[in-house]
Image: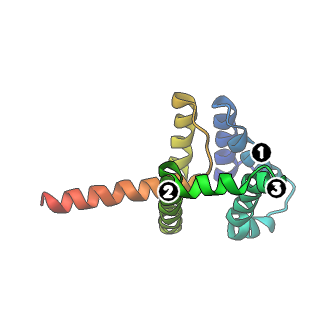
Amino acid sequence: MLNNATIGLLVLLLLGIWARSNLIAAAAAILLVIRFARLSFLFPMLERRGVELGLLFLTLAMLVPFALGKVTVRDIAKGLLTVPGILAVVGGALATHLNGRGLHLLADNSYLMISLIVGSILGIVLWGGIPVGPLMAAGVTYLMLQVIDVVSRHFH
């Protein structure tokens, strides 16, 4: 039962623990449990719907202040009608676009996933970052690849 998949998950588990990334460690541990419990039928469902489920819970957490009545009409106006608020709208639109491009990048180049995870771990260890997910990392990677493409075309 010690094959490439199991070894990879064990390495990710250890890296997650070493980097103090509970999310990476927990995800690797859960996938190991699924493998060892012979529940592999769950993998296609997780692969197909896992991102949606994760985004659902992330969105739920972000909207809790609305549900608790902690956000007022004044807060909403401030968020939409100030320079930081307008920039947040632009940032949200740009991030969403990059996330979509990142998803396509990962779909076409699944081998990049381990690099994104290693980069996330480095971000945690070196800069105290928070790994919010591979989609944003893939989106930033997509953007950097586009910049390199434009620059290389310009100089060739």
Say whether residue 112 is visible: no
C-alpha span from label 2 to label 3: 44 Å
Estimate the x, y position of residue 81 in percent, counting from the top left.
53, 57
Q: Quadrant of residue 38?
A: bottom right
Q: Nearer the viewer, residue 16 or 135?
A: 135
Disc number placed over residue 86 in the picture, else none: 2
Q: Is label 3 in a helix, a strand or a loop?
A: helix
Query: Label 1, on which residue?
Result: 29
Mark 2 or mark 3, which has the lower sequence index?
3
Residue at 77% across, 58% down? 60
Relative horizontal placement of residue 150, taking residue 19 as reference (left or right): left
How far across and how far down the image is residue 2, in percent? 72, 47
Is residue 13 shown to the viewer in this render?
yes
Q: Secondary structure at mark 2?
A: helix
Say which amino acid is labelled 2. Answer: Ile
- Residue 74 placement (x, y as % from top left): 67, 53
Check the image and name the residue furthest to the front.
74
Q: Amino acid at mark 1?
A: Ala
Query: Which one is in front, 20 or 11?
Result: 20
Q: Earlier in the sequence, mark 1 or mark 3?
A: 1
Q: Residue at x 67, y 51 (%)?
A: 75
Q: Is residue 36 above or below residue 16?
A: below
Labels 2 and 3 touching (C-beta < 8 A): no
Earlier in the chain: of badge 2 and badge 1, it is 1
- According to the picture, the residue beneath numbered tag 3 turns out to be 34
Question: Residues at badges 1 and 3 in contact (C-beta under 8 Å)?
Answer: no
